Amino acid sequence: MPVYTREFLSQIPSVDFCQADATKSDVFYYLFKSATQTTAITINEDYSLPEDERNLPMKILMHGYTSNVTSPWYKQMKQEYFQKGPHNIIYVDWSIASNKSFAVSAANIKPVGEFIADLIVSLRVPVENVHLIGHSLGSHLAGFVGKNIYSKTGKKVARITATDAAGPGFENAKPEARLNKHDATFIDVIHTDVNYYGILKPIGHVDFYVNGGKNQPGCPARKVDDNCSHARSNDYFIESINKRNVMARPAKLNDEEEIVLTSRTEDVEFGDWTPATARGIYFIKTNKTAPYLLQKKIKDT
């Protein structure tokens, strides 16, 4: 994989959705219902989810550009959620549509977002139980799923988690052409590679800039591993699923586009446990190696 410069990535034009060529047959869905299930259930819009299972929390995982369902974070996240409790977990495989040129792959999030929304509606699950989790280009795909769910049902999905939402092609895009605050009731964004593969601007209800949002501790030089900081966002979120009291501090972007702490004192919990009432920009520091997340010691009362 070539190592792209910041200058090159910043010059990628905003997405032209006229280049989209994805069809419904390009997208596959794999359902997991328990930790002991060894083989996924391949589903489509004809699949009937049993009525007594529709009220379980539903997590829908969406990979990014040139990736697929074999990406390790899918399995790791699934395992953590089943450890946490009963869930329905769907792997989305849109690799046929996401393994083309970046321009075409990025454009394909619009039709693919509608296809995924159709699948969710067909399952007849309450949208307040639906949590979309997307990495990189998959973050903006999650946004289009949310847009389409709302247009089809008049209701918003409960949550979208964006792990280092893609920056190239989206940094200067209009809100309707990317993930934005209106796509779900609550949107949390984890920034780990701003100015390269990740978006710099805050685009959620709450945006976490981990270690300042770039050059993650423990990652090698970019020429050695171009993807480490970008991928680390998934590691942080996965680790948070069964770890409480990982607190982030209020922050802001200054005029030099650097993250600086503010005088606000209300820390917020990071990751899967972030409350849906959280708003604003936050800073969090991590370890160089796993376990990455630092837990705040709670004093005895």
Image (cartoon, rainbow, N blue to C red):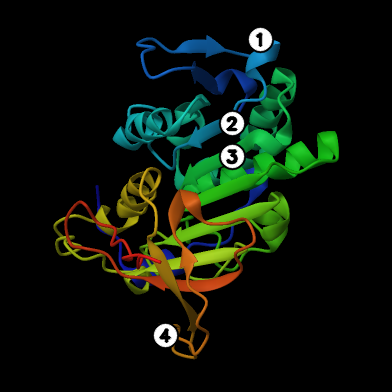
- Dot placed on the residue nearer the N-terminal end, 2 or 3: 2
Give the class, few, some or many, for how many residues have Cα within 10 Å of label 3's Cα (few <14, many ≥20).
many
Residue at (64% x, 35% y) in the render: 130
- Dot placed on the residue nearer the N-terminal end, 1 or 3: 1
- Classify residue 300 as left or right of residue 137: left
Type of amino acid at the residue the image marks with label 4: Val
Secondary structure category for the residue under label 2: loop
The residue mark sitting in front, 2 or 4, is: 2
Numbered label attached to residue 50: 1
Type of amino acid at the residue the image marks with label 1: Pro
Numbered label attached to residue 57: 2
Instruction: From the image, tell me which residue sits under label 4.
Output: 260
Answer with the quarter of the image where residue 67 lies: top left
Instruction: From the image, tell me which residue sits under label 3.
Output: 131
Question: Where 154 sits versus 53, above or below?
Answer: below
Residue at (52% x, 76% y) in the render: 266
Residue at (60% x, 26% y) in the render: 56
Q: Residue 42 location in percent, x, y?
A: 51, 11
Give the class, few, some or many, for how many residues have Cα within 10 Å of label 1's Cα (few <14, many ≥20).
few
| Residues at marks 3 and 4, CA–CA distance in whole angstroms | 30 Å
Q: Does residue 88 appear in the picture of this structure? A: yes
Type of amino acid at the residue the image marks with label 2: Pro
- Dot placed on the residue nearer the N-terminal end, 2 or 1: 1
Which residue is nearer to you in this view: 199 or 292?
292
Secondary structure category for the residue under label 3: strand
Type of amino acid at the residue the image marks with label 3: His
| Residues at marks 2 and 4, CA–CA distance in whole angstroms | 35 Å
